Image: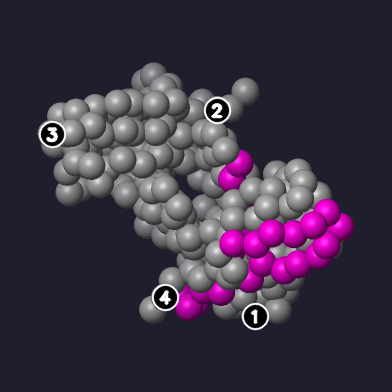
Amino acid sequence: NAGVTQTPKFQVLKTGQSMTLQCAQDMNHEYMSWYRQDPGMGLRLIHYSVGAGITDQGEVPNGYNVSRSTTEDFPLRLLSAAPSQTSVYFCASTDRDRDNSPLHFGNGTRLTVT
Amino acid sequence: GESVGLHLPTLSVQEGDNSIINCAYSNSASDYFIWYKQESGKGPQFIIDIRSNMDKRQGQRVTVLLNKTVKHLSLQIAATQPGDSAVYFCADPAFSGGYNKLIFGAGTRLAVHP
């Protein structure tokens, strides 16, 4: 049981390049989320999903796309990277919307856009 | 303004001392709170939670106190160890609208000195 796995751990992009941040969980969680964390700030919600085929926008969705074709995977796509997207990205998952089911986080992808 | 926030950005303690990290909330309807710990280079990790029908909940070396009158909760760490050095976040699922889209403040950084 690996929990939430994110790949890659580090990535450097040039402005305008595209890439996909991968996230997979093996806990059969229905809910998955993407956050970004900038220095000295808390985590901000980008997109989230309550199940396969269902996604919704969070607090800072612009510049990012997501899809949820399976329960296990929730990739985050940057279509045209910008320096403002330099950040650490965390994927998280949880069971149904209930108590005693806190978010489980991956260890993040550190992205630098030059 | 942020309605789930922490009073101090940084807390420095001596190894062996007790640590107290505070958090205020504004939603009177909030009935469940979660504390997370984030070590350097890692994703946030669940520590302990508390429901509003409790004033206190204890874990291993950690205690969370909830004061509903003043909408305040605190995380107490007994006999603080170097491994407790991290950023601590409190989260309120009712405020953010769900367990999978938690809102986190900037957190409190706990620095443990030998």
What whole-number distance in Å separates the C-alpha atoms at marks 4 and 2? 34 Å
Q: Which residue is mark 2?
A: B3
* Disc 2 residue crowd, few under 14, some 14–19, many 20+, Cα 10 Å: some
Span of residues in magenta: A10-38
* Amino acid at the residue labelled 4: Ala
| Dot 1 amino acid type | Thr
For the stretch drawn in magenta, what is the main secondary structure? strand
Q: Amino acid at mark 3?
A: Gly
> Relative to A5, is B78 above or below?
above
Q: Amino acid at mark 2?
A: Ser
Assess disc 3: are there few (<14), some (14-19) or many (≥20) residues with their C-alpha within 10 Å of its C-alpha. some
Q: Which residue is mark 4?
A: A2
Q: CA distance from mark 3 to mark 1?
A: 47 Å
- Foreground residue, A28 or B29? A28
Position above or below: B110 against A51:
above
| Circles 4 and 1 in contact, beta carbons < 8 Å | no
**Residue at 39% across, 78% down:** A1
Q: Which residue is drawn at the image coordinates 49% and 69% (left, top)?
A: A4
